[in-house]
Amino acid sequence: MKTLLLGLGLATALSALAPAAQAQTNYPWCAHYGNGTGGAMNCGFTTFEQCLETVHGIGGFCERNDWYQPPPGPHRRQRGPY
């Protein structure tokens, strides 16, 4: 049991020291599935059109992701319905 706890503690410590992933995990558009009384939300869309295609036929709506942080550096502004 001590060996298992030691191994778990070592694995946790090593994962904390690993460099953070550089992948972009948030995107500018979110899909809200369902009719507004609950349901899932997915903020993994780069364009408004991509989000609309996803919710088309299954119900839901799309809106801007207020938490989106664009990657550093020059980039062009994406247009949306707002």
Image (cartoon, grey):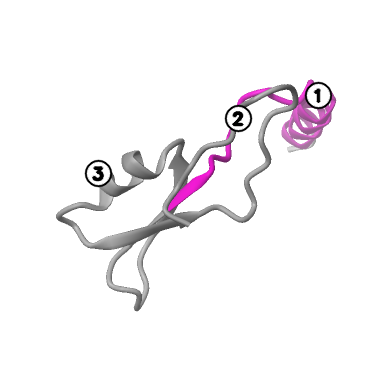
Please, what is the three-letter code of the amino acid marked with disc 3?
Glu
Q: Callout 1: helix, strand or loop?
A: helix
Q: Earlier in the sequence, mark 3 or mark 1?
A: 1
> Residue 16's spot in the image, x, y percent?
81, 31
Q: Which residues are magenta?
A: 3-30
In the image, residue 48 above or below residue 71: below
Residue 8, x across and y down, in percent: 74, 33
Q: Is residue 17 above or below residue 48?
A: above
Query: Was residue 11 drawn as part of the magenta stretch in this picture?
Result: yes
The residue lying furthest to the left in this view is 57
**What is the C-alpha distance between the residues marked 3 and 1?**
41 Å
Say whether residue 22 is magenta: yes
Residue 48 coordinates in the image, percent (x, y): 39, 44
Q: Which residue is under mark 3?
A: 53
- Residue 46: percent from left, percent from top: 46, 36
Name the residue that disc number 2 marks: 24
